Image (spheres, helix red, strand yellow):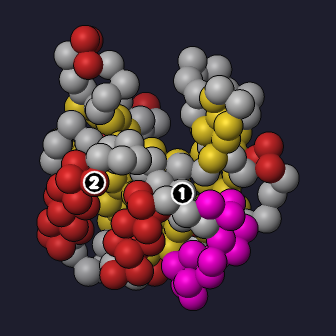
Amino acid sequence: MIYCGVPANQWASSGVAIAIRKDWKHKIQDYTWISDRIIETRIKVLNRNFTIMGVYAPVEGKEQDTQEFYRKLQQSMDKIPKKENIILAGDFNGRIGNQSVPECIGTYGEQVTNHNGAALRDFCAFNKLKITNSFYRHKDIHKFTWEARGTRSIIDYIIINDRLKSNIEDLGVFRGSEIDSDHKLVDSKFIFLTHAK
């Protein structure tokens, strides 16, 4: 596990991690802590380079923090080689709604949009990224990623660049995980063909 945390007395205010399968440890090429909200690792799998970014965006209502978060995230995106396969995953604390943006946002999200969601939509449209949660039809129990105090929303996302769009097969919420959180685990399925020599 690669992580960047905060002191125990600041628990749940920031901190982010990326878990890599134990048998893939040797595939890690590099990792960087951008901030206590953004972490990046590069791995090589099947002769393809991947940049995986784990994120934890500020909560809704912290516009200045959100602006700074996206500034740092954009700086990181600008440094990634153009031929890289990119995956961003984590708690974006944004509700993107279900108004379609071709190749970026599908129609299977929730109806609500908030300020953080608008910032995420703009960031993804600018960088030609696909918010995969919104492209797959599922029952509500396999769609909403956060639930507490009688409310639920979709705020955790897996986002990919154009190079991976033909490799993703499905995405849904895995409800059976025991992770002691009001967030649900988001499960994404990718298919990669290997060519035998």
Q: Where is 72 relative to 122, above or below?
A: above
For disc 2, the marked residue is: 63
Tell me the amino acid under the disc marked 1.
Arg
> Is 46 positioned to the left or the right of 81 in the image?
right
Towards the viewer: 77 or 11: 11
Q: Image point 35% across, 72% down: which residue? A: 123
Residue 169 in view of the camera = no
Tell me the amino acid under the disc marked 2.
Glu
Q: Image point 65% across, 26% down: which residue? A: 149
51 within the magenta span: no
Seen as rendered, the residue at the extreme front is: 61
The quadrant where residue 46 appears: bottom left
Seen as rendered, the residue at the extreme bottom is: 102
Query: Residue 95, labelled with which disc?
Result: 1
> Is 19 positioned to the left or the right of 189 in the image?
left
Q: Residue 102: x, y in percent?
A: 57, 88
- From the image, give the main secondary structure of the stretch colored magenta: loop
Query: Residue 180, labelled with which disc?
Result: none
Q: Secondary structure at mark 1?
A: loop
Q: Where is 166 relative to 22, above or below?
A: below
- Marks 2 and 1 in Cβ contact (< 8 Å): no
Q: Where is 184 relative to 139, above or below?
A: above
106 within the magenta span: yes
